[in-house]
Amino acid sequence: MKKKTILRTLAAASAVALLLGGIYLLTKDDVRQKLKETDLKPYMPTPSVLAALDDISEPEITTTITTTITGEATEPSTEAAVITTASPELSAEVRQSLIDSAQSLNSAYPDSLGWLYIPDTVISYPVMQSRDNDYYLSHAYDGTYLKAGSVFLDYRCEGRFQNPINIVYAHNMKNGSMFAQVTNFKNDSYFESHKYGWLATPETVYRIDFFSCAVADWHDSLYEGDTPVAEWVPHICDKSVVGREITYSDEYRFVSLSTCSYEFQNARTILTGKLVETKEV
């Protein structure tokens, strides 16, 4: 009887150990990711600054969603939602605080280009850049291994978002982090209620005026940053699941946030907006 009891005890202990080991394997990456995010707090925009961005009044647009995007100037109507292009105003304190945070981050981690923030989402991360598009798929901002990787700018893009077309990547994580919520923008109501993002660099602050959420193959030509804007914007229109009509010219700059999705093999969801530089008030 004693032998049987011992064997049962050992079997139960082994089962518990296997269970705990499985839980550890499932959660260790999440824990590591949380620790990395905690270590970033000294460099990220303060909660009060992010709250100020949340509270900024939005330009008035119509509420109808359309996938039509045109290069011709249009007037707002009930048939198409036209996004305005006026430069957003930030208080001197908020704007400078965002720039200071980006500068501090860049000083600590030279691969850092700035901070990306989308209100009412978990997307509040540094944007990195390396010499290829592989490194930050599996590395944190400090260069250590991290399954979730980082948010990063395509290596072919100029590092201060001066290209007409700027492509930013991140994983679609099962825990909802990184760019997982980019896929939510395919929903009409979600897209309409999340019109803007923010990008702070060591030099300036941009508002991102979202006008398209598209689905495309990972080798689609929209990832070719040297495509003329006059060709690239209509192509985004063709691929858009949901969008707003905008006017555009060759002088405009755009940013696309790309992540994996599962509509078909190698599908990507691409959320695109116009970069609008803020001005100080």
Image: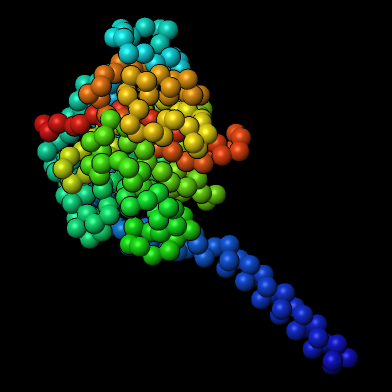
User: Measuring 32% from the left and 42% from the top, which residue is drawn there?
Assistant: 156
Asked if one can make out residue 74 in the rendered structure from this viewpoint, the answer is yes
The residue closer to the viewer here, 94 or 25, is 25
The residue closer to the viewer here, 213 or 42, is 213
Asked if one can make out residue 255 in the rendered structure from this viewpoint, the answer is no
267 lies above or below 13: above
Which residue is the extreme one toward the bottom?
Answer: 2
Residue 104: percent from left, percent from top: 19, 55
12 lies above or below 232: below
* Rendered image quadrant of residue 83: top left
Q: How many marks?
A: 0
Residue 133: percent from left, percent from top: 40, 49
Residue 222: percent from left, percent from top: 42, 30
User: Measuring 56% from the left and 39% from the top, which residue is drawn there?
Assistant: 266
User: Measuring 40% from the left and 19% from the top, which residue is drawn there?
Assistant: 234
The residue closer to the viewer here, 22 or 16, is 22
- Quadrant location, the C terminus: top left
Residue 144 lies left or right of residue 275; in this view the side is: right
Residue 128 lies left or right of residue 137; in this view the side is: left
Residue 5 lies left or right of residue 45; in this view the side is: right
- Quadrant location, the N terminus: bottom right
211 lies above or below 202: above
273 lies above or below 137: above
* Rendered image quadrant of residue 191: top left
* Rendered image quadrant of residue 34: bottom left
Which residue is the extreme one toward the right?
Answer: 1
User: Measuring 21% from the left and 38% from the top, which residue is drawn there?
Assistant: 205
Q: How is the image coloured?
A: rainbow
Residue 269: percent from left, percent from top: 49, 34
